[in-house]
């Protein structure tokens, strides 16, 4: 807890809560939540005590947000986000809806998933919604940022394991019916792009699917990126401050490049579906199936 000289509204609200004055505390915390300096601290108290304005009452799930969450920081700084808390939480719900429609289109309904791996899961923007839909016992998360995995396990009750920087060193406790990799291949350098593709495909159990996304034609045009002769572009820059930019930057790929990597790694016959601009109206989706 910060000192009163730094955030007097928070301290006064805490005293009101101790005195049993929930209405007064709620009023102060809503004011504190409107200030970026105290937004997450006020949000945490509103959620913890179920005060007026709590998002858990809207979403019906745990709306805790880690202060180390880079994706929430991205929403806070994005010019289109007037309400970063609402936008961050709603975006996880949007991702769930987009994934459900994609899996339905290939005859692999999400609700029938036996076990699900969310890879590059961050601090749970999507995990909280997935855990509510499937039940936490069917969900496993993994991320190279260990704090994100620990937060998801403690907050949402899911299983989890730490990822690694080198795909050849990746070890998972099992294979999974669905492996979902949202916006990882949009950040990988050329040196590890297809080795990560192989490593993650190897985590799919027979009959299961790997779903991953890329920055394709629309994203390339929007950001005015020029691809190389292979159909690839990488720059060492991203919204995450927790990973070396040379390992996790910003990547754009042509559809043909991705198809060629799939063909080289596991065979193009494993490509079950390509869905352009499927996620966030910005990222392309590829669905690969492992044969029985």
Image (tube, rainbow, N blue to C red):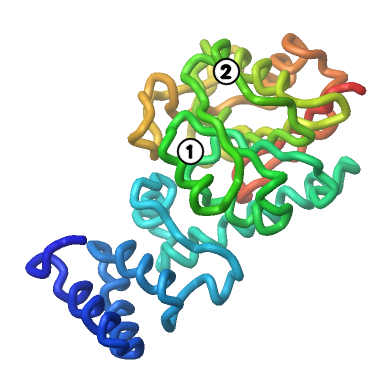
Q: Residue at x 57, y 18 (%)?
A: 170
Quadrant position of the C terminus in the picture: top right
- Secondary structure at badge 2 equals loop
Residue that mark 1 sits on: 223
The disc label shown at residue 170, or none: 2
For the residue pair 169 and 19, the one nearer the viewer reads as 19
Instruction: Characterize the local packing of mark 1: few (<14), some (14-19) or many (20 or more) Cα atoms within 10 angstroms.
Output: few
Q: Earlier in the sequence, mark 2 or mark 1?
A: 2
Q: Residue at x 75, y 31 (%)?
A: 176
Confirm or deny contact between disc 2 and disc 1 (CB under 8 A).
no
At label 2, counting other C-alpha atoms closer than 10 Å, the crowd grade (few under 14, some 14-19, many 20 or more) is some
Q: Which residue sits at x=90%, y=43%?
A: 107
Going 60% across and 46% down the picture, which residue do you hit?
158
Can the viewer see residue 220? no
Q: Is residue 67 left or right of residue 263?
A: left
Q: Secondary structure at mark 1?
A: loop
**Apparent side of residue 261 relative to residue 15 in the rendered image (left or right):** right
Front residue of 33/260: it is 33
* Residue 240 image offset from top left, x and y in percent: 38, 37
Label 2 or label 1, whichever lies nearer to me, is: 2
Q: Quadrant of residue 121?
A: top right
Residue 196 percent across, percent down from the top left: 60, 18
């Amino acid at each position: 807890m910060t000192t009163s000289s730094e955030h007097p509204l928070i301290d006064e609200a805490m005293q009101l809560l101790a005195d049993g004055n929930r209405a007064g505390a709620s009023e102060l915390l809503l004011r504190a939540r409107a200030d970026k300096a105290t937004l997450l601290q006020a949000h945490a108290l509103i959620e913890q005590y179920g005060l007026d304005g709590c998002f858990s009452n809207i979403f019906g799930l745990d709306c805790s947000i880690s202060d180390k969450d880079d994706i929430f920081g991205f929403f806070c700084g994005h010019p289109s986000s007037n309400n970063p808390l609402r936008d961050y939480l709603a975006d996880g719900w949007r991702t769930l809806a987009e994934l459900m429609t994609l899996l339905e289109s290939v005859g692999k309904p999400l609700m029938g998933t036996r076990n699900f791996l969310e890879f590059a899961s961050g601090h749970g923007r999507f995990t909280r919604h997935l855990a509510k839909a499937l039940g936490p016992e069917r969900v496993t998360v993994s991320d190279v940022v260990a704090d994100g995995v620990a937060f998801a396990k403690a907050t949402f009750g899911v299983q989890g394991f730490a990822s690694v920087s080198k795909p050849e060193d990746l070890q998972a406790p099992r294979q999974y019916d669905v492996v979902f990799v949202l916006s990882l291949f949009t950040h990988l350098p050329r040196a590890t792009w297809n080795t990560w593709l192989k490593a993650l495909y190897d985590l799919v159990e027979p009959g299961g699917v790997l779903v991953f996304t890329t920055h394709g034609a629309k994203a390339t045009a929007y950001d005015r990126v020029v691809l190389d002769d292979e159909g690839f572009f990488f720059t060492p820059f991203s919204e995450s401050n927790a990973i070396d930019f040379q390992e996790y930057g910003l990547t754009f790929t042509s559809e043909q490049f991705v198809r060629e990597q799939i063909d080289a790694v596991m065979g193009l016959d494993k490509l079950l579906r390509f869905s352009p601009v499927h996620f966030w109206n910005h990222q392309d989706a590829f669905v690969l199936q492992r044969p029985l």
